[in-house]
């Protein structure tokens, strides 16, 4: 047992610990002799203000806040998602940019699998926002009764991800049909009907014959004065 542990055990037992008693025990004679003579110097304890702060590692400690490595790129991605018309304009007008971006991710999952089972961290990472913003967007849509959130707690373990389902019939129709793209500029040109190669060859042969007949009809013999 080291000298430190001996001192601690003596202090916990309630008996006053004397250095002479501890040095008299044959643990390490050379080291004890150096401590007794002063040849081996001990390092003084640091003041409390200068001691390094050690964080206690625990499985139940709060997670660190989520931060984007590139804030400008996250803002641009969030605005791009909100500008892709994930819901009717009348519904999107009641939400913020982050909430519309959340609706874009939910609508994509609903269109693909029928419901959204992504975690809030995954939605936040895709939408360029933090977890709290995604949670507020989810609560806002649930408050408007456009979605339902089914919680799946697991006793004694990490909870499963929530199941988000869309309730709004108008939004479901929008997700199913999607926004219709509008043609910008130009004019519509009707396409020609399909023709067989035989009909095309016959038309090319008849065209010179018709031109020759038309030229013969318009031709007149010249008169005596040279006029036609």
Image: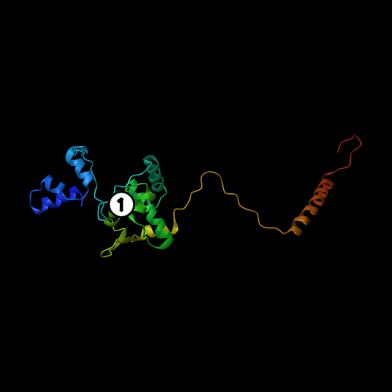
Q: Is residue 15 left or right of residue 3?
A: left
- Viewer-nearest residue: 161 or 109: 161
Image height check: is 120 above or below 35? below
* Residue 67 in which image quadrant: top left
Q: Residue sitting at 28 percent across and 57 percent down?
A: 142
* Outermost residue, top side: 225
* Outermost residue, right side: 224
Q: Is residue 209 left or right of residue 113?
A: right
Q: Residue sitting at 30 percent across and 51 percent down?
A: 137
Residue 75 seen anywhere in this rendered image of the structure: yes
Q: Is residue 25 left or right of residue 81?
A: left
Residue 87 seen anywhere in this rendered image of the structure: no
Secondary structure under the numbered disc 1 in the rendered image: helix
Could you tell me residue 136's position as x and y percent?
28, 51
Q: Residue sitting at 38 percent across and 46 percent down?
A: 78
- Viewer-nearest residue: 190 or 29: 29
Q: Which quadrant is home to the C terminus?
A: top right
Could you tell me residue 210's position as x and y percent?
80, 51
**Residue named by callout 1:** 137
* Outermost residue, bottom side: 155
């Amino acid at each position: 047992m080291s000298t430190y542990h001996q001192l601690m055990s003596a202090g916990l037992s309630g008996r006053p610990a004397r250095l002479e008693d501890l040095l008299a025990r044959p643990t390490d004679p050379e080291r004890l002799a150096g401590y007794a003579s002063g040849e081996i110097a001990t390092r003084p304890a640091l003041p409390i203000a200068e001691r390094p702060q050690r964080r206690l590692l625990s499985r139940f400690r709060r997670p660190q806040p989520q931060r984007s490595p590139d804030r400008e790129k996250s803002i641009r991605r969030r605005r791009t998602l909100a500008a892709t018309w994930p819901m009717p304009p009348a519904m999107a007008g009641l939400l913020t940019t982050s909430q519309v971006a959340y609706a874009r991710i939910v609508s994509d999952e609903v269109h693909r699998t029928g419901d959204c089972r992504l975690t809030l961290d995954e939605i936040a990472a895709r939408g360029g926002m933090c977890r709290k913003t995604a949670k507020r967007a989810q609560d806002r849509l649930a408050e408007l009764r456009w979605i339902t959130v089914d919680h799946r707690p697991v006793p004694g373990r990490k909870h499963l991800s929530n199941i988000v389902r869309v309730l709004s019939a108008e939004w479901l129709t929008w997700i199913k049909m999607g926004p219709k793209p509008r043609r910008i500029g130009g004019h519509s040109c009707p396409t020609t009907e399909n023709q067989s190669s035989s009909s095309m060859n016959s038309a090319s042969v008849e065209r010179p014959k018709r031109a020759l007949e038309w030229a013969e009809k318009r031709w007149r013999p010249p008169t005596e004065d040279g006029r036609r």
